[in-house]
Protein backbone atom coordinates (compact mmCIF):
# COMPACT_ATOMS: atom_id res chain seq x y z
CA UNK A 1 0.00 0.00 0.00
CA UNK A 2 2.93 2.35 0.62
CA UNK A 3 4.08 2.05 -2.98
CA UNK A 4 0.57 2.89 -4.10
CA UNK A 5 0.45 6.02 -1.95
CA UNK A 6 3.89 7.07 -3.18
CA UNK A 7 2.76 6.55 -6.75
CA UNK A 8 -0.31 8.73 -6.24
CA UNK A 9 1.46 11.68 -4.67
CA UNK A 10 4.33 11.68 -7.16
CA UNK A 11 4.80 15.13 -8.62
CA UNK A 12 4.15 15.60 -12.31
CA UNK A 13 7.43 15.93 -14.26
CA UNK A 14 6.56 19.33 -15.74
CA UNK A 15 10.24 20.26 -16.04
CA UNK A 16 10.86 17.25 -18.22
CA UNK A 17 7.84 18.03 -20.39
CA UNK A 18 8.98 21.65 -20.87
CA UNK A 19 12.51 20.57 -21.72
CA UNK A 20 11.26 17.97 -24.19
CA UNK A 21 8.95 20.58 -25.71
CA UNK A 22 11.79 23.05 -26.15
CA UNK A 23 14.01 20.40 -27.71
CA UNK A 24 11.16 19.41 -30.01
CA UNK A 25 10.69 22.99 -31.25
CA UNK A 26 14.43 23.47 -31.69
CA UNK A 27 14.68 20.25 -33.69
CA UNK A 28 11.65 21.08 -35.82
CA UNK A 29 13.00 24.56 -36.60
CA UNK A 30 16.31 23.15 -37.79
CA UNK A 31 15.17 20.36 -40.09
CA UNK A 32 16.55 21.97 -43.25
CA UNK A 33 19.81 22.86 -41.53
CA UNK A 34 20.19 19.23 -40.44
CA UNK A 35 19.54 17.83 -43.91
CA UNK A 36 21.87 20.41 -45.54
CA UNK A 37 24.66 19.71 -43.05
CA UNK A 38 24.55 15.94 -43.40
CA UNK A 39 24.46 16.32 -47.16
CA UNK A 40 27.51 18.61 -47.03
CA UNK A 41 29.33 16.16 -44.75
CA UNK A 42 28.66 13.36 -47.21
CA UNK A 43 29.98 15.63 -49.98
CA UNK A 44 26.78 15.32 -51.98
CA UNK A 45 25.13 18.07 -53.96
CA UNK A 46 21.39 18.63 -54.34
CA UNK A 47 22.08 19.20 -58.02
CA UNK A 48 22.51 15.44 -58.51
CA UNK A 49 19.69 12.88 -58.46
CA UNK A 50 21.31 11.01 -55.57
CA UNK A 51 21.87 14.20 -53.58
CA UNK A 52 18.26 15.30 -54.05
CA UNK A 53 16.96 11.87 -53.00
CA UNK A 54 19.18 11.79 -49.89
CA UNK A 55 18.18 15.34 -48.95
CA UNK A 56 14.48 14.47 -49.30
CA UNK A 57 15.00 11.47 -47.00
CA UNK A 58 17.05 13.40 -44.42
CA UNK A 59 14.50 16.19 -44.27
CA UNK A 60 11.24 14.22 -44.34
CA UNK A 61 12.06 11.35 -41.99
CA UNK A 62 12.88 13.44 -38.88
CA UNK A 63 10.01 15.79 -39.72
CA UNK A 64 7.40 13.05 -39.87
CA UNK A 65 8.78 11.31 -36.78
CA UNK A 66 8.82 14.59 -34.81
CA UNK A 67 5.24 15.40 -35.75
CA UNK A 68 4.14 11.88 -34.96
CA UNK A 69 5.84 11.94 -31.55
CA UNK A 70 4.35 15.32 -30.64
CA UNK A 71 0.81 14.55 -31.71
CA UNK A 72 0.80 11.03 -30.26
CA UNK A 73 2.10 12.34 -26.91
CA UNK A 74 -0.66 14.93 -26.71
CA UNK A 75 -3.29 12.36 -27.71
CA UNK A 76 -1.98 9.95 -25.07
CA UNK A 77 -2.72 12.63 -22.48
CA UNK A 78 -6.11 13.48 -24.04
CA UNK A 79 -7.05 9.78 -23.82
CA UNK A 80 -6.72 9.91 -20.02
CA UNK A 81 -9.56 12.44 -19.94
CA UNK A 82 -11.92 10.46 -22.17
CA UNK A 83 -12.77 6.84 -21.51
CA UNK A 84 -15.26 4.90 -23.63
CA UNK A 85 -17.57 5.02 -20.59
CA UNK A 86 -17.52 8.81 -20.58
CA UNK A 87 -18.08 8.99 -24.32
CA UNK A 88 -21.06 6.70 -23.96
CA UNK A 89 -22.51 8.82 -21.17
CA UNK A 90 -22.12 11.90 -23.37
CA UNK A 91 -23.88 10.21 -26.29
CA UNK A 92 -26.74 8.41 -24.60
CA UNK A 93 -30.08 10.00 -25.32
CA UNK A 94 -28.70 12.14 -28.16
CA UNK A 95 -30.93 12.48 -31.18
CA UNK A 96 -29.96 11.85 -34.77
CA UNK A 97 -28.34 14.92 -36.24
CA UNK A 98 -26.51 16.66 -33.42
CA UNK A 99 -25.78 13.24 -31.94
CA UNK A 100 -24.01 12.15 -35.14
CA UNK A 101 -21.80 15.23 -35.21
CA UNK A 102 -20.96 14.68 -31.56
CA UNK A 103 -20.28 10.97 -32.02
CA UNK A 104 -18.01 11.43 -35.03
CA UNK A 105 -16.02 14.11 -33.21
CA UNK A 106 -15.68 12.01 -30.06
CA UNK A 107 -14.49 9.18 -32.31
CA UNK A 108 -11.29 11.11 -32.96
CA UNK A 109 -10.34 11.56 -29.32
CA UNK A 110 -11.68 8.40 -27.67
CA UNK A 111 -9.07 5.69 -27.21
CA UNK A 112 -9.92 2.98 -29.70
CA UNK A 113 -8.48 -0.28 -30.94
CA UNK A 114 -10.11 -2.33 -33.64
CA UNK A 115 -10.64 -5.33 -31.35
CA UNK A 116 -12.79 -3.24 -29.02
CA UNK A 117 -15.08 -2.08 -31.83
CA UNK A 118 -17.78 -4.64 -31.08
CA UNK A 119 -17.89 -4.20 -27.28
CA UNK A 120 -18.10 -0.44 -27.84
CA UNK A 121 -20.88 -0.92 -30.35
CA UNK A 122 -22.96 -3.08 -28.01
CA UNK A 123 -22.13 -0.92 -25.00
CA UNK A 124 -23.34 2.22 -26.77
CA UNK A 125 -26.58 0.63 -27.97
CA UNK A 126 -27.36 -0.85 -24.57
CA UNK A 127 -27.03 2.60 -22.99
CA UNK A 128 -29.61 4.00 -25.37
CA UNK A 129 -27.33 5.59 -27.95
CA UNK A 130 -29.28 5.47 -31.26
CA UNK A 131 -28.05 3.07 -33.95
CA UNK A 132 -27.17 5.83 -36.44
CA UNK A 133 -25.22 7.79 -33.82
CA UNK A 134 -23.34 4.64 -32.79
CA UNK A 135 -22.36 4.07 -36.41
CA UNK A 136 -21.04 7.61 -36.75
CA UNK A 137 -18.71 6.85 -33.86
CA UNK A 138 -17.73 3.47 -35.22
CA UNK A 139 -16.84 4.92 -38.63
CA UNK A 140 -14.87 7.94 -37.47
CA UNK A 141 -12.93 6.26 -34.63
CA UNK A 142 -10.62 4.11 -36.77
CA UNK A 143 -10.60 6.29 -39.90
CA UNK A 144 -9.89 9.74 -38.48
CA UNK A 145 -7.13 9.01 -36.01
CA UNK A 146 -4.11 10.93 -34.79
CA UNK A 147 -1.59 8.68 -36.51
CA UNK A 148 -3.17 9.13 -39.94
CA UNK A 149 -3.47 12.89 -39.39
CA UNK A 150 0.11 13.27 -38.13
CA UNK A 151 1.47 11.32 -41.07
CA UNK A 152 -0.54 13.25 -43.65
CA UNK A 153 0.50 16.52 -42.02
CA UNK A 154 4.16 15.48 -42.10
CA UNK A 155 4.17 14.22 -45.66
CA UNK A 156 1.68 16.42 -47.51
CA UNK A 157 1.19 19.48 -45.32
CA UNK A 158 -1.54 20.76 -43.04
CA UNK A 159 -4.05 21.42 -45.82
CA UNK A 160 -4.21 17.77 -46.79
CA UNK A 161 -4.44 16.72 -43.12
CA UNK A 162 -7.23 19.24 -42.48
CA UNK A 163 -9.14 18.14 -45.57
CA UNK A 164 -8.79 14.50 -44.51
CA UNK A 165 -10.11 15.42 -41.06
CA UNK A 166 -13.10 17.36 -42.35
CA UNK A 167 -14.06 14.92 -45.09
CA UNK A 168 -13.49 11.88 -42.86
CA UNK A 169 -15.80 13.41 -40.27
CA UNK A 170 -18.36 14.17 -42.98
CA UNK A 171 -18.37 10.57 -44.17
CA UNK A 172 -18.89 9.37 -40.58
CA UNK A 173 -21.67 11.88 -39.86
CA UNK A 174 -23.59 11.42 -43.11
CA UNK A 175 -23.24 7.62 -43.16
CA UNK A 176 -24.53 7.45 -39.57
CA UNK A 177 -27.43 9.73 -40.45
CA UNK A 178 -28.41 7.57 -43.42
CA UNK A 179 -28.17 4.33 -41.44
CA UNK A 180 -30.22 5.94 -38.66
CA UNK A 181 -32.90 7.11 -41.08
CA UNK A 182 -33.21 3.66 -42.63
CA UNK A 183 -34.41 2.30 -39.27
CA UNK A 184 -32.46 -0.93 -39.43
CA UNK A 185 -32.69 -1.87 -35.75
CA UNK A 186 -34.34 -5.16 -36.67
CA UNK A 187 -31.09 -6.27 -38.29
CA UNK A 188 -29.28 -6.33 -34.95
CA UNK A 189 -28.67 -9.81 -33.57
CA UNK A 190 -31.34 -10.77 -31.06
CA UNK A 191 -29.05 -10.88 -28.02
CA UNK A 192 -27.86 -7.36 -28.76
CA UNK A 193 -31.43 -6.11 -28.87
CA UNK A 194 -32.20 -7.93 -25.63
CA UNK A 195 -29.29 -6.11 -24.04
CA UNK A 196 -30.89 -2.86 -25.06
CA UNK A 197 -33.03 -2.94 -21.97
CA UNK A 198 -30.49 -4.05 -19.42
CA UNK A 199 -28.71 -1.37 -17.46
CA UNK A 200 -24.97 -1.57 -17.83
CA UNK A 201 -22.97 -1.01 -14.68
CA UNK A 202 -20.80 2.01 -14.89
CA UNK A 203 -17.23 1.64 -13.87
CA UNK A 204 -16.29 4.48 -11.60
CA UNK A 205 -12.71 5.17 -12.56
CA UNK A 206 -10.53 7.26 -10.33
CA UNK A 207 -9.26 10.57 -11.65
CA UNK A 208 -5.64 10.06 -12.65
CA UNK A 209 -2.99 12.50 -11.41
CA UNK A 210 -1.09 14.67 -13.89
CA UNK A 211 1.98 12.52 -13.27
CA UNK A 212 0.14 9.45 -14.51
CA UNK A 213 -1.41 11.38 -17.42
CA UNK A 214 2.06 12.34 -18.60
CA UNK A 215 3.18 8.74 -18.08
CA UNK A 216 0.30 7.68 -20.30
CA UNK A 217 1.48 10.08 -23.02
CA UNK A 218 5.00 8.65 -22.86
CA UNK A 219 3.71 5.06 -22.94
CA UNK A 220 1.54 5.89 -25.95
CA UNK A 221 4.50 7.43 -27.79
CA UNK A 222 6.64 4.35 -27.10
CA UNK A 223 3.84 2.09 -28.22
CA UNK A 224 2.80 3.91 -31.41
CA UNK A 225 6.08 5.41 -32.59
CA UNK A 226 7.80 2.12 -31.67
CA UNK A 227 5.48 0.32 -34.08
CA UNK A 228 5.27 2.91 -36.82
CA UNK A 229 8.85 4.12 -37.38
CA UNK A 230 9.92 1.29 -39.72
CA UNK A 231 7.01 2.13 -42.04
CA UNK A 232 7.98 5.79 -41.98
CA UNK A 233 11.57 4.90 -42.91
CA UNK A 234 10.55 2.52 -45.69
CA UNK A 235 7.86 4.86 -46.97
CA UNK A 236 10.06 7.90 -47.14
CA UNK A 237 13.03 5.96 -48.55
CA UNK A 238 10.69 4.74 -51.28
CA UNK A 239 9.39 8.26 -51.81
CA UNK A 240 12.97 9.58 -51.94
CA UNK A 241 13.99 7.00 -54.52
CA UNK A 242 11.04 7.89 -56.71
CA UNK A 243 11.59 11.59 -56.07
CA UNK A 244 15.05 11.40 -57.57
CA UNK A 245 14.60 8.90 -60.35
CA UNK A 246 11.32 7.52 -61.66
CA UNK A 247 9.51 9.81 -64.10
CA UNK A 248 6.75 11.63 -62.23
CA UNK A 249 3.86 10.79 -64.53
CA UNK A 250 4.47 7.04 -64.42
CA UNK A 251 1.11 6.34 -62.72
CA UNK A 252 -0.68 9.42 -63.97
CA UNK A 253 -2.52 7.69 -66.81
CA UNK A 254 -4.02 5.00 -64.54
CA UNK A 255 -4.48 6.83 -61.25
CA UNK A 256 -4.23 10.45 -62.31
CA UNK A 257 -6.87 13.10 -62.03
CA UNK A 258 -8.17 12.54 -65.56
CA UNK A 259 -8.92 8.88 -64.93
CA UNK A 260 -12.29 9.40 -63.24
CA UNK A 261 -12.98 5.69 -62.83
CA UNK A 262 -9.86 5.21 -60.75
CA UNK A 263 -11.54 6.50 -57.54
CA UNK A 264 -14.30 3.85 -57.31
CA UNK A 265 -11.85 1.13 -58.35
CA UNK A 266 -9.35 2.21 -55.69
CA UNK A 267 -12.12 2.09 -53.05
CA UNK A 268 -13.36 -1.28 -54.29
CA UNK A 269 -9.85 -2.71 -53.97
CA UNK A 270 -9.38 -1.07 -50.58
CA UNK A 271 -12.60 -2.21 -48.89
CA UNK A 272 -11.74 -5.87 -48.19
CA UNK A 273 -8.11 -5.05 -47.32
CA UNK A 274 -6.95 -4.26 -43.84
CA UNK A 275 -3.93 -2.30 -42.74
CA UNK A 276 -3.19 0.45 -40.24
CA UNK A 277 -2.53 3.98 -41.50
CA UNK A 278 1.19 3.45 -40.89
CA UNK A 279 1.39 0.29 -42.98
CA UNK A 280 -0.01 2.19 -45.94
CA UNK A 281 2.55 4.99 -45.98
CA UNK A 282 5.02 3.23 -48.28
CA UNK A 283 2.19 2.54 -50.73
CA UNK A 284 0.83 6.07 -50.52
CA UNK A 285 4.28 7.62 -50.99
CA UNK A 286 5.05 5.38 -53.94
CA UNK A 287 1.74 6.03 -55.70
CA UNK A 288 1.83 9.78 -55.23
CA UNK A 289 5.48 9.97 -56.18
CA UNK A 290 4.58 8.34 -59.47
CA UNK A 291 1.85 10.81 -60.32
CA UNK A 292 -1.29 9.23 -58.89
CA UNK A 293 -3.87 11.82 -57.87
CA UNK A 294 -3.94 12.57 -54.14
CA UNK A 295 -7.72 12.14 -53.83
CA UNK A 296 -7.61 8.71 -55.43
CA UNK A 297 -4.81 7.60 -53.11
CA UNK A 298 -6.48 9.03 -50.00
CA UNK A 299 -9.80 7.38 -50.91
CA UNK A 300 -7.89 4.11 -51.17
CA UNK A 301 -6.29 4.77 -47.78
CA UNK A 302 -9.62 5.62 -46.14
CA UNK A 303 -11.32 2.51 -47.48
CA UNK A 304 -8.51 0.26 -46.28
CA UNK A 305 -8.60 1.74 -42.77
CA UNK A 306 -12.36 2.20 -42.36
CA UNK A 307 -13.68 -1.00 -43.90
CA UNK A 308 -12.15 -4.44 -43.92
CA UNK A 309 -13.18 -8.05 -44.28
CA UNK A 310 -11.90 -9.08 -40.80
CA UNK A 311 -13.89 -6.24 -39.23
CA UNK A 312 -17.08 -7.27 -41.00
CA UNK A 313 -16.61 -10.86 -39.86
CA UNK A 314 -16.38 -9.62 -36.25
CA UNK A 315 -19.40 -7.35 -36.76
CA UNK A 316 -21.37 -10.36 -37.98
CA UNK A 317 -21.56 -11.38 -34.29
CA UNK A 318 -23.79 -8.41 -33.58
CA UNK A 319 -25.26 -7.39 -36.95
CA UNK A 320 -27.23 -9.30 -39.54
CA UNK A 321 -26.05 -9.29 -43.13
CA UNK A 322 -28.36 -6.58 -44.56
CA UNK A 323 -27.07 -4.10 -41.99
CA UNK A 324 -23.43 -5.00 -42.62
CA UNK A 325 -24.00 -4.62 -46.37
CA UNK A 326 -25.71 -1.25 -45.88
CA UNK A 327 -22.91 -0.06 -43.60
CA UNK A 328 -20.22 -1.07 -46.10
CA UNK A 329 -22.14 0.33 -49.06
CA UNK A 330 -22.92 3.70 -47.50
CA UNK A 331 -19.38 4.24 -46.19
CA UNK A 332 -17.77 3.12 -49.47
CA UNK A 333 -20.01 5.51 -51.44
CA UNK A 334 -19.07 8.33 -49.05
CA UNK A 335 -15.38 7.64 -49.52
CA UNK A 336 -15.73 7.67 -53.31
CA UNK A 337 -17.31 11.13 -53.09
CA UNK A 338 -14.49 12.26 -50.80
CA UNK A 339 -11.98 11.03 -53.37
CA UNK A 340 -13.58 13.16 -56.08
CA UNK A 341 -13.74 16.20 -53.79
CA UNK A 342 -10.03 15.84 -52.97
CA UNK A 343 -9.13 15.55 -56.63
CA UNK A 344 -11.22 18.59 -57.46
CA UNK A 345 -9.91 20.79 -54.64
CA UNK A 346 -6.20 19.93 -54.61
CA UNK B 1 -9.29 -16.81 -1.47
CA UNK B 2 -10.06 -14.20 -4.12
CA UNK B 3 -11.96 -14.85 -7.31
CA UNK B 4 -10.39 -13.05 -10.24
CA UNK B 5 -12.01 -12.96 -13.66
CA UNK B 6 -10.24 -11.48 -16.67
CA UNK B 7 -12.57 -10.45 -19.49
CA UNK B 8 -11.24 -10.42 -23.03
CA UNK B 9 -11.77 -11.92 -26.45
CA UNK B 10 -9.05 -13.84 -28.22
CA UNK B 11 -8.00 -11.01 -30.53
CA UNK B 12 -6.67 -8.90 -27.71
CA UNK B 13 -3.03 -9.57 -26.84
CA UNK B 14 -3.06 -7.70 -23.56
CA UNK B 15 -5.51 -10.14 -21.97
CA UNK B 16 -2.97 -12.96 -21.60
CA UNK B 17 -0.43 -10.54 -20.18
CA UNK B 18 -2.96 -9.24 -17.67
CA UNK B 19 -3.56 -12.78 -16.40
CA UNK B 20 0.18 -13.40 -16.11
CA UNK B 21 0.66 -10.11 -14.29
CA UNK B 22 -2.08 -10.79 -11.74
CA UNK B 23 -0.95 -14.39 -11.20
CA UNK B 24 2.63 -13.20 -10.69
CA UNK B 25 1.60 -10.50 -8.24
CA UNK B 26 -0.53 -12.94 -6.22
CA UNK B 27 2.36 -15.40 -6.05
CA UNK B 28 4.81 -12.69 -4.90
CA UNK B 29 2.42 -11.48 -2.25
CA UNK B 30 1.38 -14.95 -1.12
CA UNK B 31 -2.30 -14.23 -1.78
CA UNK B 32 -4.49 -17.20 -2.65
CA UNK B 33 -6.48 -16.49 -5.84
CA UNK B 34 -8.42 -18.32 -8.51
CA UNK B 35 -8.14 -16.81 -12.00
CA UNK B 36 -10.71 -17.42 -14.66
CA UNK B 37 -10.82 -16.07 -18.20
CA UNK B 38 -14.06 -15.17 -19.95
CA UNK B 39 -13.81 -14.98 -23.74
CA UNK B 40 -17.43 -15.15 -24.84
CA UNK B 41 -18.45 -11.72 -26.08
CA UNK B 42 -21.99 -12.02 -24.80
CA UNK B 43 -20.81 -12.93 -21.30
CA UNK B 44 -18.25 -10.11 -21.35
CA UNK B 45 -20.87 -7.58 -22.33
CA UNK B 46 -23.06 -8.73 -19.44
CA UNK B 47 -20.46 -7.16 -17.13
CA UNK B 48 -21.12 -3.81 -18.78
CA UNK B 49 -17.54 -3.06 -19.85
CA UNK B 50 -16.73 -1.66 -23.29
CA UNK B 51 -13.00 -1.97 -23.58
CA UNK B 52 -10.77 -4.89 -22.88
CA UNK B 53 -9.14 -6.39 -20.94
CA UNK B 54 -11.53 -6.07 -18.02
CA UNK B 55 -10.79 -7.29 -14.49
CA UNK B 56 -13.42 -8.53 -12.05
CA UNK B 57 -12.48 -9.19 -8.42
CA UNK B 58 -14.98 -11.08 -6.27
CA UNK B 59 -17.81 -10.15 -8.61
CA UNK B 60 -16.96 -6.46 -8.87
CA UNK B 61 -15.60 -4.86 -12.06
CA UNK B 62 -12.48 -2.94 -10.99
CA UNK B 63 -10.74 -2.20 -14.26
CA UNK B 64 -11.27 -1.99 -18.01
CA UNK B 65 -9.47 -0.94 -21.15
CA UNK B 66 -5.79 -1.44 -20.51
CA UNK B 67 -3.22 -3.61 -18.85
CA UNK B 68 -3.46 -2.73 -15.15
CA UNK B 69 -0.34 -1.43 -13.44
CA UNK B 70 1.41 -3.54 -10.83
CA UNK B 71 0.50 -0.97 -8.15
CA UNK B 72 -3.17 -1.26 -9.02
CA UNK B 73 -3.05 -5.06 -8.87
CA UNK B 74 -1.30 -4.95 -5.50
CA UNK B 75 -4.05 -2.67 -4.28
CA UNK B 76 -6.79 -5.10 -5.33
CA UNK B 77 -5.08 -8.11 -3.80
CA UNK B 78 -4.28 -6.30 -0.57
CA UNK B 79 -7.81 -5.37 0.38
Image: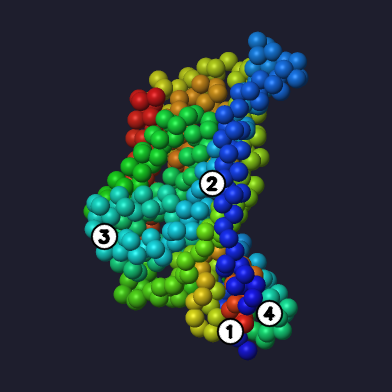
Q: Which residue is mark 1?
A: B79
Q: Is residue A42 left or right of residue A66?
A: right
User: How does the figure colour the protein chain or chains?
Assistant: rainbow
Q: Which residue is mark 4?
A: B26
Subunit under mark 3: A
For numbered disc 2, what is the local secondary structure? helix
For numbered disc 4, what is the local secondary structure? helix
Q: Mark 2 touching mark 3, by CB under 8 A?
A: no
Judging depth in this view, the residue of A219 and A99 nearest the camera is A219
Q: Which residue is mark 3?
A: A94
x, y (%) of residue A106? 38, 53
Mark 1 vs 4, N-terminal side: 4
Q: Which residue is mark 2?
A: A72
Subunit under mark 2: A
Quadrant in the picture for residue B29: bottom right
Q: Can residue A147 be seen in this snapshot?
A: no
Residue shown at 68%/84% (left/top)? B31
Q: Quadrant of the N terminus of chain B?
A: bottom right
Residue A241 vertical placement versus A167 (above, below):
above
Residue shown at 30%/64% (left/top)? A92
Q: Of discs 1 and 2, which sits in the foreground?
A: 1
Residue A85 vertical placement versus A13 (above, below):
below
Mark pair 1, 4: CA separation: 12 Å
Neighbour class for label 1 at 10 Å: few (<14), some, many (≥20)? few
Amino acid sequence: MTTLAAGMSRRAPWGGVLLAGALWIAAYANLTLFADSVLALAALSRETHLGEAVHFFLYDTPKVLLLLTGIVFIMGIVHTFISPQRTRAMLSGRRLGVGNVFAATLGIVTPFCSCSAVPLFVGFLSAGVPLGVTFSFLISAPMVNEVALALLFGMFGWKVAALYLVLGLSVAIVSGLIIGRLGMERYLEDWVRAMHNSNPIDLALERPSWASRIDAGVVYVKDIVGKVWPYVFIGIALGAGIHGYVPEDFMASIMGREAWWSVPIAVLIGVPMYSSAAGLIPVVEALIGKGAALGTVLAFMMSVIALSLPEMIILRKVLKLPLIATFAGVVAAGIVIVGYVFNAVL
Amino acid sequence: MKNVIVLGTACCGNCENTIKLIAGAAKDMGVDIRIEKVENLQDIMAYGIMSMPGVVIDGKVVHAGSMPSREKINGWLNT
